Image (tube, grey):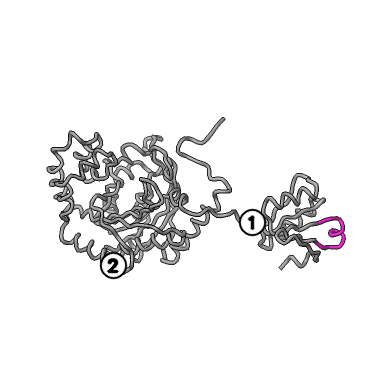
Amino acid sequence: MLSTPKGTHDLLPEDLSTWQFMEAMARETFARSNFQEIRTPILEYTELFARGVGDSTDIVNKEMYSFEKGDRQLTLRPENTAGVVRAYIQHGMDRWPKPVKLFYMGPQFRYERPQAGRQRQFHQVGAELFGIDTPQSDLTVIALAYDFLALLGLNNLSLEINNVGCFVCREDFKIKFKALVKPYLSELCEDCNKRYETNPLRMLDCKNPTCKAVYQRSDIQAFLNEDQTCSECQTHFQTLLDLLEKSEISAHRNKMLVRGLDYYTRTVFEITSNHLGAQNAVCGGGRYNGLVKTLGGPDTPAVGWAMGMERLISLIQKKDTLSLDYYVASDDLLSAQVLARKLRQQGYSVDLDLSGKALGKQLAQADKLGVRQVAILGESERLNGTVTLKDMTQKTQTTVPQESLFR
């Protein structure tokens, strides 16, 4: 029997009411803050992610679905920020009034071990803000994320935040950090040893328990607790912390938080839920001031976030499928179809039997579907131009002219 590939899943009708609720709340949140939707291709040139996400990241090295077609390497997008930045450059959005505020929803693809809330084909909702390099714009996108989660009915959330510095002060951090961890390399995993050479900051993102224990040693923690960033980055970050406090958004600084993508600068953050397991982040993001320039555009500050929709779904109370307004039951199919179409043209949701069931079985089917009212068209109703309405909740019925159903 054929089935879905590992790490993918079907979204069945009973699931989609909850998905549609989540998507509607996202659109409402973004509309309130004047974020406009953008839809980028699922398929992009591999070079976009190698340059944008970083060729030292696990995503590029291990997780991308890439293939060759003609003389070009193509990739199913593993994340959406790089694609949005590519579109920002390609379509000259740097000439738009600032800030440029965009959002997206759609599938992403990563070859990783499937687990609860994480699949190989997964969906993200995300927001990107271009053109403003202030702590206030960081606050804007963080508050936007909280507002969306509140509309979903989610609480018990925590904000973890860190300052990873700019490209200049980060280089000094890397030199000092490499000297500090060098004596421990034999205790660290293969990935951390590779990152030591290519991107030592991302060593702190390792999930290996042995490596995590090494990074908790007193000398490393003492180094991390001393802010290694430049005065400008420190001022930006402290101002953001003050703004968050004034906005009544509680934040905890996590010196180990670096995120898994190379393009982040200064602010990085995660919003976590205590209703998930070890992988408890529902939102991740930060500032990426150099990415637009890296991909060939003008030097443009930017900040944004993404949320995994499968993880959100696991936290949202399941929504019931919307019930139908009418079910048309009749011993004459054509008459039922004509009435059903007229009702649909009036904006009602309507279903009917197409298989020729007896009238009693049609009523039973309507009851299973959770229909509010059944419009019964028997022989006498057809002759008199009437319809008998049966209230399936109150179990009452009345006969009215068919024309009274049409506005």
| Circle 1 Cα neighbour tier, 10 Å, few/some/many (<14 / 14–19 / ≥20) | few
On the image, numbered disc 2 is attached to which residue? 243
Q: Amino acid at mark 1?
A: Ser
- Which residue is at the front of the view, 91 or 400? 400
Quadrant where the C terminus lies? bottom right
Give the SS element for disc 1. Answer: loop
Segment tinted magenta in the rendering: 377-387
Instruction: Using the image, determine if residue 379 lies above or below residue 245.
Output: above
One can see residue 158 in this view: yes
Q: From the viewer's perspective, is 19 left or right of 130?
A: right
Which residue does the numbered mark 1 point to in the structure image?
A: 323
Residue 204 in the image, given as x and y percentages of width and height: 24, 45
Q: Tag 1 or tag 2, which sits nearer the N-term?
A: 2
* Residue 193 location, quadrant: top left
Q: Residue at x 41, y 35 (%)?
A: 69
In the image, is 299 to the left or to the right of 183? right
| Three-letter amino acid code at the position of disc 2 | Leu
Residue furthest to the top in view is 1
Residue 349 as seen in the image, left or right of residue 249: right
Which is nearer the eye, 291 or 30?
Answer: 30
Asked if one can make out residue 168 in the rendered structure from this viewpoint, the answer is no
Which quadrant does the N terminus fall into? Answer: top right
The correct choice, above or below, for 141 with respect to 307 in the image is: below
Residue 261 within the magenta-colored segment of the rendering: no
> How would you rate the neighbour count of disc 2 (Cα within 10 Å): few for under 14, some for 14-19, many for 20 or more?
some
| Label 2 – label 1 distance at C-alpha | 45 Å
